[in-house]
């Protein structure tokens, strides 16, 4: 499985699950997706910077793993809107965790709370993530973990609805468990609001190249462990070498309007790859996978409707799960892990991936430098007939990091690239008319940014970003608000 080129690409089609569209499995899933032909640019999409507000002139700044701790793509979420308020979280200069809010859609000043915790390590994995359990109106905070015990707080009931004092005392003490549920050492906690007002948390146990994704669930009565749902086991062979362990890196996970849980991901082989790579300067990420669940993560199915996994059992999503790969790609193309996912109004998944195409090289020897030079973003999506498509965006990534994909009114797509550039494509074109709608010139972002797409139905998008600093000198952190459409 090499890099995808225009000459060698072939299109494949599957029958998509229409709340359970079952089809016989075929070999088509093994073929790479065809690249869509560009369409003329459409005037139906746009992005206008309305305002840019500094939340903190002196936010904590250091570079680790080529990223910064206050803006990383795997934060789910670092900024969000619930009810009447928009919320954001970051570490300030003295390493204290800060959570802030403002009335949603306003230019009002942010109200900040210093939480009783300071970042424990200079590690960009140790982000802050926010989630809301709508059923009891609590704001949940998980933070500062990389193969270590999580730091967790939850607010008093109703605080996320605007009831009660906006003060540190409304969050109580920092816990090292989820209200008594001990997760052990974890990485990449992601909150998932559930239909009906609950909240879930998915997270990794184990390490890079040998890890397992787990699911926990919150109701007003507390947290409980649902179980592990991915497997590190199985054999994967490339460049004459076989890897026997790996981990799943999520591009995204979330529910659609009908209550289906969608998850897209890539795999990383044994501790970054070793001899499985064509060159040790690469990183052994490969393939784009997709599964879904109609019972809140208890069972998982592949795109063709076949049972893929049963959470909490030995039957988990693995490298050997038939039909889970929707866009094959080998290990030697600097495929980025943990990019982005969105789901459209018809319940069809959209995935943003990026890698170095084969027209530049079929053997990446420097993951960071060659991504910065050659990486291209791709939009991979399924239409309502069940056919998967793939479109290369017309601008390079021009960075090590990741892009964010959101869907606006009418399911038009917007990609926010590192540095704050925004590209857009219309649903009416079949997403073939990607064009730049904001060049990023008014946003001085270090690299990756976070987005709040909660108000896209109103034509508003918030971009959360931090300015590049020097060494470990603190730098300003911002929220920029855009009119979309």
Image (cartoon, grey):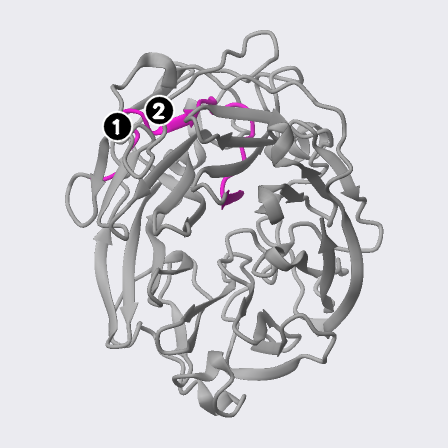
Chain-order first, disc 2 or disc 1: 2
- Checking the image for residue 22, the label placed there is 1
The quadrant of the image that shows the N terminus is top left
- Dots 2 and 1: beta carbons under 8 Å? yes
Q: Position of residue 351 (x, y in %)?
A: 51, 37
- Above or below — where is 452 with respect to 390? below
Q: Residues within 10 Å of mark 2 (few under 14, many from 20)?
A: many
Q: Name the residue rendered at 76%, 70% in the picture.
A: 53
Any magenta on residue 463? no
Disc 2 to disc 1, C-alpha distance: 7 Å
Q: Name the residue rendered at 37%, 50% in the picture.
A: 258
Residue furthest out toward the top: 7
Residue 274 seen in the figure: yes
Which residue, given by chain and number where applicable, does mark 2 sit on? 15
Question: Which sits in the foreground, 107 or 73?
Answer: 107
Give the magenta part as a residue range. Answer: 316-343
């Amino acid at each position: 499985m090499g890099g995808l080129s225009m000459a060698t690409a072939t299109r494949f089609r599957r029958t998509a699950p229409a709340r359970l569209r079952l089809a016989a499995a075929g070999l088509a899933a093994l073929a790479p997706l065809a690249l869509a032909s560009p369409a003329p640019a459409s005037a139906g999409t746009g992005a206008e910077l309305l305002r840019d507000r500094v939340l903190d002139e002196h936010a904590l700044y250091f570079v680790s793993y080529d990223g910064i701790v206050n803006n990383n793509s795997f934060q789910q979420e670092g900024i969000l809107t619930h009810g009447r308020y928009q919320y954001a979280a970051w570490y300030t200069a003295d390493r204290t965790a800060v959570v802030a809010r403002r009335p949603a859609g306003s230019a009002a000043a942010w109200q900040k709370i210093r939480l009783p915790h300071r970042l424990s390590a200079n590690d960009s994995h140790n982000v802050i993530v926010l989630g809301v359990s709508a059923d009891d109106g609590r704001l949940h905070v998980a933070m500062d973990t990389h193969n270590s015990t999580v730091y967790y707080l939850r607010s008093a009931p109703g605080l996320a609805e605007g009831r009660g004092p906006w003060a540190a005392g409304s969050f109580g003490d920092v816990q090292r468990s989820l209200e008594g549920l001990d997760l052990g050492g974890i990485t990449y906690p992601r909150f998932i609001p559930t239909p009906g007002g609950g909240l879930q948390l998915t997270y990794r146990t184990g390490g890079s190249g040998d890890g397992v994704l787990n699911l926990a669930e919150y109701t007003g009565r507390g947290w409980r462990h649902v179980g592990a749902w991915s497997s590190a086991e199985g054999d994967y062979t490339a460049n004459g070498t076989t890897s026997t362990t790996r981990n799943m890196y999520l591009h995204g996970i979330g529910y659609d309007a009908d209550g289906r849980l969608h998850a897209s991901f890539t795999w990383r082989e044994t501790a970054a790859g070793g001899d499985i790579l064509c060159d040790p300067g690469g990183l052994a990420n490969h393939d784009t996978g997709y599964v879904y669940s109609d019972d809140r993560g208890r069972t998982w199915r592949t795109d063709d409707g076949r049972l893929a996994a049963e959470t909490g059992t030995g039957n988990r999503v693995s490298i050997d799960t038939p039909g889970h790969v929707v866009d094959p790609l080998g290990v030697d193309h600097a495929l980025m892990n943990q990019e982005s996912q969105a789901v459209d109004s018809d319940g069809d998944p959209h995935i943003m991936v990026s890698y170095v195409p084969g027209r530049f090289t079929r053997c990446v020897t420097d993951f960071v430098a060659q991504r910065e030079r050659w990486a291209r973003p791709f939009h991979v999506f399924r239409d309502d007939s069940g056919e998967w498509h793939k479109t290369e965006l017309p601008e390079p990534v021009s960075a090590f990091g990741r892009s964010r994909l959101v869907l606006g009114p009418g399911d038009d797509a917007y990609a926010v690239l590192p540095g704050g550039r925004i590209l857009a494509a219309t649903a009416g074109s079949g997403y073939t008319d990607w064009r730049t709608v904001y060049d990023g010139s008014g946003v001085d972002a270090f690299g990756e940014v976070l987005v709040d797409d909660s108000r896209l139905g109103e034509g508003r998008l918030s971009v959360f970003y931090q300015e590049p600093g020097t060494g470990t000198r603190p730098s300003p952190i911002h929220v920029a608000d855009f009119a979309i459409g």
